[in-house]
Each structure stands twice: as structure tokens, then as C-alpha cells.
């Protein structure tokens, strides 16, 4: 399916079963004196966290699901914003009758700190100087991101989440939630993720960061008056998009097709794949802050829940797991999910793992809706209702 | 739907091998089913006997069916799926109609006995009378109710008789606690190695 057709298809579905018009909300905390203490020892505050919610919280507050987004995502996971035709990034999965059924569950999507989508990040104003933080923004980790989300969940009055879910960097937040607040997580659905960033993953991120920092427009991160390092950020994103696809999906999408049907013997984008990467890069600089990209890729690289850091030795947790990976994903390969599975076996954790047969590479977690929906829907059913619901399937 | 009605329905429709394994397993036990397929057996056990069930299965379609039934399953093959489990993790490890598809039988049985207090093994009997006839009189690779595949499409890589398996256990000091021999619809008592389609053994360490 081409990108364009995919959007068309999404529009069709959208009309049928969408959460409708939604609004991003903002939670403020960590006021002076109560700042968030970060893993690095630095402090951050005040903090604004952007979030959206879909569906209704039930009386005993047992149906709340936290959705964590990936590197360049935001709080807008489902529905549309008023007067804009911008469908949420996981709209295929969140809505009435969908995997995260908003007729039954209360779904929260929280933005991350250090991002640039309404939450406090390097482009926010530093109260100490009255200017954007830039490189004065403290280094943050996935654990800091989760601690900030915990403030939001507390503020919403939810003591225990039915589930925490997300793909890629979102999946790392899921694992971090289990590590930091296991008693608050009834079930975890980490998708296409890892419990520690590998040297290969760090390497790709470092190339992306160097591309940004090598752009003279980066100005040591102090570019907010002049405009951001567009070329560097675009290159960083182009690298990202290569790692999100598989060789098969690239072959299907572009093959060696030429933009103008013939070779022109110049350095303009001649192949369709080049055009695609340029298009993606150019679009990205319009919607994402270069410094946020630097800080968040660092947070990914610092991520390491190996050893006893996720579930300490000898400790039992009640959290149920559903892990999903994709066969053609080489950025967060199945072997990394299997490593998590091995840990769960050692700790006697109730878990399901499924490697789905997709050709879409890492992008699959956004695209492969049908199979993910089957797995997630029934897994959540079981988590909430035990075998009462499963009963209706019977045994043939 | 009342529980008695459900059990009655279950005992009418349920496969004979499942019925026998179902009767062996104690309520509330911790169970690992190796090659659990679509999870029919685990589902019955989880629903009626409140066992803590975990499956291991290689087919992702089958895993989807298991999850529909509310079961927990790992996408893994039997041979590499057991290593990480600590000793005595389960009350029962089930290896029903899957041992014949395993290459390294010795290490799977060894690991199963390490992580489970008891191991339930169920397999088709290659020395079943009709298989013998097909081979001896017709000169053809046997196809029976319990071995329904042609030589070119069988997933099986191990072909064994009841006598073979008993000898295997004897040679390794594995205790056979219970043995069940299955015909088409009921248990077989006489000359099982000749008349049984399938056998189910409950094993433990010496």
C-alpha cells in the first residue's frame, strides 16, 4: 500500500469509528520547590505535560489505559483536532470497537518531557533566563519521562492502570513503568521494542545527532530566533526513515523507479526513494524541534533495563504482559523482544509473545492493524474480566 | 450457562487424549503446554480447573486463537523455549502430540523433567496394527488415524512405538507414573503396542 492510499484508507475508517473531535490538554506540576528530580541529579520545573484522553473512566477507575508514543509522536493519538484534518497517530487502534475500545476503556495518551508538542522541552522558556532552554535543558532519561507521566496519572486520580502500551520508544516507557511502578500496572503491552539500546541503535542515533550539530544553523542549540537547523534535522530524519523500513518494503514501495522516468546525471533526487526521503525530511523540520531530537535520542541511548533493573531478582510482579514484534523489523528486531521474554520466563511472569509476519519493518507497529487488534483486544478482555469473556468463544 | 452443562458438553465433544490429560491434572496446578496449538486443552483446564496455564507454540495463527481464548502463549519453538525456566517452575509440563516433531528429544525431555515436577507425554503409536499391515502387506509408508500424513508432508521427524518409548525411559532412569493407551474412542487394555493409536505417559524423575 502506498503512503497516499494508506491515508485514504485511514480516512475511510475514520468516518466509521472515530473518537471524533478531541482536544489536547495540559497538566502543570513541579512548581518551584517541588521540581522533578531527574536521573542525572539535575532538577526540572515547572513542567507542562500535554495529554489527550478518549472514552470514559469507569466508577471504580479500573479501565484506564496509558498509551506512550514513539520518538517523534505526540499526545494526539486518536480522533481529530477541531478545524484541522490531522488524524491521531494511532487512530487505527484507538476508538469505538477498535483494539483500544473507547466504548469500554479510558485511554490516556501522554506526551513526553523534552519533546516539542506542548510539553516542557528545550524549546520551552527557561524561567531562569526568560529565553528558550536550548542546551541548558537538562539531560533526561526514559525513567524521567515515566516519572513525569506518573504525576499526570496521579492527577487524574488513577491508582492502577489496566494497561500501559506503546511501540518503539513508547515500548521502552512501558517497560520503565513496570520497573518503576509495578504495582500500578495491571498489564503491559510493549511493541517492537527493547529493554536496552544496542550499539547499533546508539550508532544510528549518534549519526542523526551529528547531522544536526554539524549544521551551522544549529548554533549550539541557540537557534530559536534565527530558525532551526533544517538541513541537519532533515538528514537526521532521513536516516531514521531508512531504519523504519525493510529492504522488502523499500523494494515494493520504490524499487529502482525514477522520478522523471530517466536518468538525468545530476545530484537532484533522481530515484523515487531519494524523493521520498527528501519529502519526509522536509516535512519533519516543519513539525519537530532539532534540540528535542537530540535530547530524546539521548534518552533512548541511555535506556538499559538489563540485569535486575526491570524486575529485581526474587521479586514477583502481578503485571501480565503481551509482547509483539515484527519479523522484518531490523531496528528493534524480534531477538530483542525475545530477550524480554526470557527475562519474564525466569521471573515466572504471566506473558504472551507473538512475532507478527509483516514486511513493513519497524513501521509495522503503526500499519499492521488487524493482527495487533486481535491480540490486544482479547488480551485486555482477559485482563479486565478473566475467563468470563473468553467463555463466549467456547471450544469447538 | 451452568458449569455442569459445560462439563457435560465438554466431555461429549472433547478429544479422547484431552479428556485423559484433563483428568490427570489437579485443580490450580501450574502448567506449561509445549506445542499447545490453538489452546483447546489449556482453555478447558484454565476455565474449569483454574490452572495457571502457559503455552509455547510456533504458529502465529494458532497463537492468535489462544489469545482469543484468554490464554498466555510464547511464540517459540519447543527446543529453545525451555532453557530459561528455573527448575520446578511447573507442576505439569505437557508434551502432547508434539514430541514426534522435535529433533532433539533427549534434551527436550530432560529440560521438561527439570522445569516440571511431572511431564505428560502423548504420542502416536507407530506400531499400531494398521500401520504394521500397511508396511508389511502393502509395502507403503503407514497412514493411520493418529499418523494421518503422507511421507512428503508430515511434520513428524520421530517415529516411535509404545515399546520404544518405554525402553527410552528405562534407559534414562525416567519413572513412568501412569500410562494410558488410546484407541479410536476408548482406552485400550490388551496388547497396547499393537492396538493403541496413541499413548499418554506421566513421567517424573527417578
Image (spheres, rainbow, N blue to C red):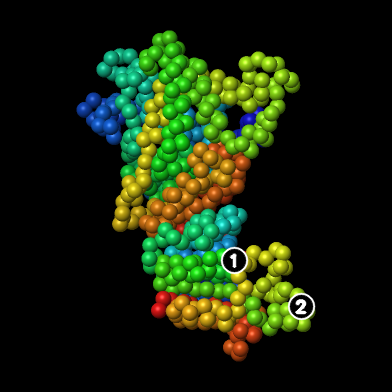
Question: Which residue is located at x 57 percent, y 79 percent?
Answer: B164
Picture disc at residue B194: none
Outermost residue to the right: B138
Q: Quadrant of residue B173?
A: bottom left
- Identify the element where label 2 is drawn: loop
Number of on-image labels: 2
- Residue A184 visible to the viewer: no
Indicate the quadrant where residue A156 lies: top left
Q: Closest to the observer: A384 or A358?
A: A358
Q: Is residue B38 above or below residue A329?
A: below
Q: Nearer the viewer, mark 1 or mark 2?
A: 2
Q: Residue A216 in the image: x percent, y percent?
A: 44, 13
Q: Which residue was labeled with disc 2? A: B139
Q: Residues within 10 Å of mark 2 (few under 14, many from 20)?
A: few
Residue drawn at (41%, 54%) of the image: A344
Q: Chain of mark 1?
A: B
What residue sits 43% from the left and 24% below the top? A209
| Mark 1 vs 2, N-terminal side | 1
Question: Which residue sits furthest top?
Answer: A226
Q: Estimate the x, y position of residue A171 in percent, counting from the top left.
A: 44, 41
Mark 1 highlights which residue? B101
Q: Is residue B133 visible?
A: yes
Q: Quadrant of the C terminus of chain A?
A: bottom right
Amino acid at each position: 500500500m502506498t503512503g497516499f492510499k494508506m491515508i485514504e484508507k485511514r480516512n475511510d475508517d475514520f468516518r466509521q469509528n472515530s473518537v471524533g473531535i478531541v482536544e489536547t490538554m495540559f497538566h502543570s506540576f513541579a512548581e518551584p520547590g517541588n521540581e522533578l528530580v531527574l536521573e542525572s541529579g539535575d532538577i526540572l520545573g515547572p513542567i507542562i505535560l500535554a495529554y489527550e484522553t478518549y472514552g470514559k473512566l469507569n466508577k471504580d477507575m479500573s479501565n484506564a489505559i496509558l498509551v506512550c508514543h514513539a520518538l517523534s509522536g505526540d499526545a494526539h493519538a486518536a480522533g481529530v483536532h477541531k478545524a484541522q484534518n490531522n488524524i491521531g497517530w494511532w487512530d487505527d487502534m484507538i476508538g469505538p470497537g477498535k483494539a483500544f475500545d473507547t466504548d469500554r476503556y479510558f485511554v490516556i495518551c501522554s506526551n513526553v518531557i523534552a519533546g516539542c508538542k506542548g510539553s516542557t522541552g528545550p524549546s520551552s522558556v527557561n524561567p531562569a533566563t526568560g529565553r528558550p532552554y536550548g542546551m541548558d535543558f537538562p539531560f533526561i532519561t526514559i525513567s524521567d519521562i515515566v516519572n513525569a507521566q506518573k504525576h499526570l496519572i496521579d492527577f487524574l486520580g488513577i491508582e492502577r492502570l489496566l494497561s500501559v502500551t506503546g511501540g518503539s520508544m513508547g515500548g521502552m516507557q512501558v517497560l520503565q513503568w513496570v520497573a518503576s511502578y509495578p504495582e500500578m500496572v495491571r498489564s503491559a503491552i510493549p511493541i517492537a521494542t527493547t529493554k536496552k539500546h544496542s550499539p547499533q541503535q546508539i550508532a544510528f542515533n549518534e549519526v542523526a545527532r551529528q547531522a544536526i550539530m554539524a549544521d551551522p544553523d544549529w548554533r549550539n542549540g541557540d537557534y530559536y530566533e534565527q530558525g532551526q537547523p533544517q538541513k541537519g534535522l532533515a538528514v537526521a530524519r532521513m536516516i531514521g526513515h531508512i531504519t523504519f523500513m525493510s529492504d522488502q518494503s523499500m523494494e515494493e514501495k520504490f524499487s529502482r523507479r525514477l522520478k522523471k522516468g530517466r536518468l538525468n546525471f545530476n545530484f537532484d533526487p533522481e530515484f523515487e526513494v531519494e524523493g521520498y526521503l527528501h519529502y519526509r525530511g522536509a516535512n519533519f523540520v516543519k513539525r519537530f524541534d532539532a534540540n528535542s531530537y537530540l535530547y530524546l535520542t539521548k534518552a533512548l541511548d541511555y535506556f538499559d533495563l538489563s540485569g535486575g533493573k526491570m524486575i529485581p531478582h526474587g521479586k514477583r510482579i502481578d503485571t501480565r504482559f503481551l509482547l509483539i514484534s515484527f519479523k522484518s523489523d531490523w531496528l528493534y528486531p524480534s531477538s530483542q523482544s525475545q530477550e524480554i521474554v526470557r527475562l519474564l520466563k525466569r521471573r515466572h511472569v504471566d506473558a504472551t509473545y507473538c512475532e507478527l509476519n509483516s514486511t513493513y519493518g519497524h513501521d509495522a507497529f503503526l500499519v499492521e492493524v488487524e493482527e495487533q487488534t486481535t491480540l490486544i483486544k482479547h488480551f485486555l478482555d482477559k485482563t479486565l474480566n478473566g475467563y468470563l469473556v473468553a467463555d463466549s468463544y467456547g471450544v469447538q | 450457562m451452568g458449569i455442569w452443562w459445560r462439563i457435560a458438553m465438554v466431555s461429549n465433544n472433547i478429544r479422547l487424549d484431552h479428556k485423559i490429560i484433563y483428568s490427570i491434572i489437579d485443580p490450580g496446578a501450574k502448567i506449561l503446554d509445549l506445542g499447545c496449538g490453538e489452546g483447546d486443552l489449556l482453555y478447558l483446564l484454565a476455565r474449569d480447573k483454574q490452572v495457571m496455564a502457559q503455552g509455547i507454540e510456533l504458529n502465529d495463527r494458532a497463537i492468535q486463537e489462544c489469545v482469543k481464548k484468554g490464554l498466555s502463549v510464547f511464540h517459540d519453538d519447543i527446543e529453545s523455549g525451555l532453557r530459561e525456566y528455573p527448575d520446578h517452575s511447573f507442576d505439569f509440563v505437557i508434551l502432547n502430540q508434539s514430541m514426534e516433531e522435535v529433533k532433539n528429544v533427549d534434551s527436550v525431555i530432560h529440560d521438561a523433567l527439570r522445569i516440571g515436577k511431572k511431564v505428560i507425554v502423548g504420542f502416536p503409536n507407530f506400531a499400531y496394527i494398521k500401520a504394521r499391515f500397511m508396511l508389511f502387506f502393502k509395502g507403503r509408508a503407514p497412514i493411520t488415524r493418529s499418523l494421518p500424513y503422507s511421507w512428503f508432508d508430515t511434520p513428524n521427524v520421530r517415529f516411535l512405538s509404545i515399546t520404544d518409548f518405554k525402553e527410552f525411559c528405562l534407559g534414562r532412569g525416567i519413572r513412568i507414573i501412569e500410562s494410558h493407551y488410546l484407541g479410536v474412542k476408548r482406552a485400550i487394555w490388551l496388547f497396547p503396542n499393537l492396538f493403541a493409536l496413541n499413548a499418554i505417559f506421566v513421567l517424573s524423575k527417578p
